[in-house]
Image (tube, rainbow, N blue to C red):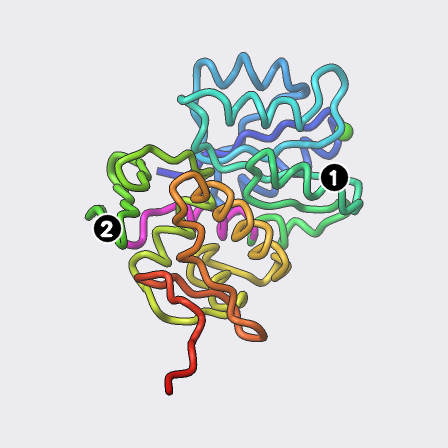
Amino acid sequence: MPASVLIVEDEPAILELIAINLQHAGFDALRAKSAEEAGRLLNDVLPDLVLLDWMLPGQSGLALARRLRGDARTRELPLIFLTARADESDKLAGLESGADDYITKPFSTKELVARIRAVLRRRKPQHGDEPVEIAGLRLDPSAHLVAGNGRPLALGPTEFRLLHYLLTHPNRVYSRAQLLDEVWGDHVFIEERTVDVHIRRLRQALAPSGHDALIETVRGSGYALRTAVVAPAVARG
Ligand code: CA
């Protein structure tokens, strides 16, 4: 069955161009000209991915993204922003809203299709469904739950995948590029600084139970998850 992509774009020519190219690439293309229309459509159909224009008349793309992330039914829906702005604060606002990727206009349809495939690929479960627990930090993939010392912790979808990867590969140092490969699936189009943003958010999410201390920044190398918090080395006499 072809993957379905909902395109939310108010420019009819761009909407049609994207839809035709996605169909040529083997996707089912669903169309909406506004966030409101997309919202109505999503009540009936759940696509495999949403391609969302940032600047829309009426409700903005960002507002729709936040609404989708706030609803249990659409929380996990992969989301790529189409934005004419390359502005850094918008990119960060998009990331905070839980977008999986951005594409800045103008873009090539080849690049667009490659990014859609990359997001769909990395959304597939990769590391098994067995719960994993280290030092009182437990992640249950099938229930999609994380708990620190039995206390539930709230993680975004990317932080969840990142933590799952680190918990199943502890005590090894991963560079940002390696983490992008392993967790994001295809790092060709994603800046390495994206990893830092998600590591910061992961630490914030783990802070209530103190498990943020398990995530170590290895200067000049990357990140590692330790199975225990290591105290600074003390010289012994
Ligand atoms: Ca627009």
Q: Nearer the viewer, residue 152 or 125?
A: 152
| Quarter of the rendering occupied by the C terminus | bottom left
Instruction: Classify mark 1: residues with Cα within 10 Å, few (<14), some (14-19) or many (20+).
Output: some
What is the secondary structure assignment of the residue under circle 1? Answer: helix
Where does residue 31 sit, x and y in percent of width and height?
59, 25
User: Start and end of the magenta stretch?
Assistant: 115-128
Where does residue 149 sit, x and y in percent of width and height?
28, 41
Q: Is residue 59 left or right of residue 27?
A: right
Placement of 20 over or under 167, stated as above or below? above
Residue 90 disc label: 1
| Mark 1 or mark 2, earlier in chain | 1
* Ligand 1 found in image quarter: top right
Name which residue type carries label 2.
Val
Residue at 48% x, 65% y: name it.
223
Residues under numbered marks 1 and 2 in contact, where contact means CB atoms less than 8 Å apart: no
Count of numbered tags: 2
Q: Is residue 125 magenta?
A: yes
Where residue 234 sits, quadrant-wise, is: bottom left
What is the secondary structure assignment of the residue under circle 2? Answer: strand
Residue 132 disc label: 2
Label 1, label 2: how far apart the Cα atoms are: 35 Å
Chief secondary structure of the magenta span? helix
Can you name the residue that lies furthest to the left here?
130
Residue at 44% x, 14% y: name it.
44
Establish whether ligand 1 lies closer than 8 Å to the Cβ of label 1.
no
Instruction: Classify mark 2: residues with Cα within 10 Å, few (<14), some (14-19) or many (20+).
Output: some
Where residue 154 sits, quadrant-wise, is: top left
Residue at 51% x, 43% y: name it.
204
Placement of 28 over or under 228, stated as above or below? above
Residue at 49% x, 48% y: name it.
203
